[in-house]
Image (cartoon, helix red, strand yellow):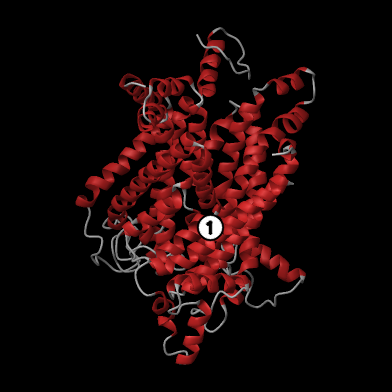
Amino acid sequence: MSGVSEAQGLRAWAGAVLRDGKARAGAVILLFFVLLATVGPLLVTDPDALVSVPLQPPSAEHWLGTTGQGQDVLAQLVVGTRVSLLIGFGVGISVVLIGALIGITAGYFGGRVDGFLSLLFNVFLVIPGLPLAIVIAAYLPSGPWTLALVLIVTGWAWNARVVRAQTLALREQDFVAAATVVGESHFRIITRELLPTMTSLLLAQIIGSTVYAIGAQVGLEYLGLGDVSAFTWGTNLYWAENDSALLTGAWWTFVPTGIAVALVGFALTMLNSGFDELSNPRLGMERVWRQHLLSKGEEPTRATPVVRS
Amino acid sequence: MRYLLRRLGFYLLAAWAAMTLNFFLPRLLPGDPSTRLFARLQGRLAPEAMDALRDAFGLNDAPLLVQYFTYIREVFQGNFGISIAYFPTPVTEVIAKGLPWTLFLAGSAVVVSFVLGTALGAITAWWRRSWVDSVLPSTLILIGSFPYFWLAMFALYLLGFVLGWFPLGHAYGDDLEPGFSWLFITDVIRHSALPVATLVLATWGGWLLTMRNTMITVMGSDFVGLAEAKGLPTRKVLTRYAARNALLPSVTGFGMALGFVLGGSLLTEIVFAYPGQGYLLVQAVKSQDYALMQGIFLIITFSVLTANWFVDLLYLWLDPRTRGAR
């Protein structure tokens, strides 16, 4: 695998995003939140400042109302975006890297190494993640980076499993055999031959893991396991619950945060679905076949074409 | 049979791993475990009683290995320690009160969501390119993007607080005596409707998409084409030929989803003040009740492992190929 095909891979990804309406929508939403996270905090008031009477509904002055402590909800939401996204992507990338390393090692070397590593990630997969995360987080000093660590520990196993399966399939291919015959080292085969062919899989995993990380982080912080004096999406919801937002009817203290979490998750999933055609060629061929039939004035069929011109 | 035994061995190993993790976690992390575990008992217990408790947990100056075996023995005897949040009730007793509620909530949510999602997944795959197929997946992904517990908060606010259609929390009305009366059972169902509904709403999209994707692959295979060519009724081709085979990956995912939903239901319980494990867990976190926290973690893990084994049994029945010697 050379640099040329990697560049082609990336171009194919960019192409898939632009071609697919869903992926395009996802990219736009995501870009908006990334902008919000980077420049947003400069534009809003201090999220900690007591600016008004507690639990005021949205008004011209405070667009999303005030919290039970009399702070500005919008400011907290915007400032929270930064840490939440940072941890989300940080954890997403970390778990995929760890998963890829362990998965490839298991799949490539096989035998006892595979037996041990497979057992390890299968055990981690079957032990319920959230309760484990709660127990670990409760023992550690609270803070956003503690949570990141906990989420990495509980989140890498699924990626390892997928990468191992992929490695097993790739290992039998001719280009790996050729590299072995030429006398390339294991390290070189893994990093130069196997990893590049998995680029699209790994990118898709990063997106999926980021969705997981943001959701789990918000959940743990809602439980009060984060640093409750920091501003993140999860702690916003924690304080909303603590100030009995539900039973006082203060919907504005928890609805905007939930929508923000959902929009980011939705955007990432949409982005991924645009890449579906790349990882599952069947879908792409069906689209081409359908367009072909329609252009000839024929009824589209359900059959999947095997050959593409 | 060998397959089942091998799976059983794996689950036992996983259970052992969870116990070991539970044992080493407080000892590996900074701070003296016994002071951590017992600091909050200070002043509530006589010093002699404290020492007896320390001994019971192996939290004394004995070598680590001895402590470890003491701990494992205690777990097997069902002794998880004394709860601090609910002092002086033993952890086992506290958990036993909450466990049925959690299993009820998470269990019904998983089953409803699996059946609903898988059936709809099969249908949308069959009638691809129809409006249902173009709108439904995106909608479900959007709903699934909300955190479980946020959906619960929103549903509770809208349907419980504003419209008053559902009770605002707990598993049954305060004025009712638990028992097998018609009144009590309907009340329990009324109280569980919103928590179960929000869990289903958050999870069925996953089932739908998995089923839809495998259905698309299966429907491309020759035997489905043959069944259609033979002129079998569509319903029969859909259920007996395509869906049965496409079901296998979903069933494999079922075991893992159990753990996931059980985790999600913990947070949902907190929103509804539902008296299950999640509610206990938050009490434990608030009062730094480590014994209770770890007990809940172990019990949930054991439940998930047991459920997984039953899923394996189900898989054996669904896929005859696994029945062969492996």
Name the spot of residue B11 as percent of width and height, x first: 61, 54
Residue at 48 percent across and 25 percent down: it is A277
For the residue pair B220 and B147, the one nearer the viewer reads as B220
B270 up-or-down from A102: above or below: below
Q: Is residue A54 visible?
A: yes
- Give amino acid for label 1: Gly
B289 up-or-down from A232: above or below: below
Name the spot of residue A210 as percent of width and height, x first: 40, 44
Q: What kind of element bears circle 1?
A: helix
Task: Tell me the residue that label 1 is attached to.
Answer: B263
Q: Quadrant of residue B24?
A: bottom left
* Side of A67 relative to A46 (left or right): right
A275 up-or-down from B282: above or below: above
Residue at 29 percent across and 62 percent down: it is A230
For the residue pair B70 and B202, the one nearer the viewer reads as B70
* Side of B8 relative to A271 (left or right): right
The subunit carrying tag 1 is B
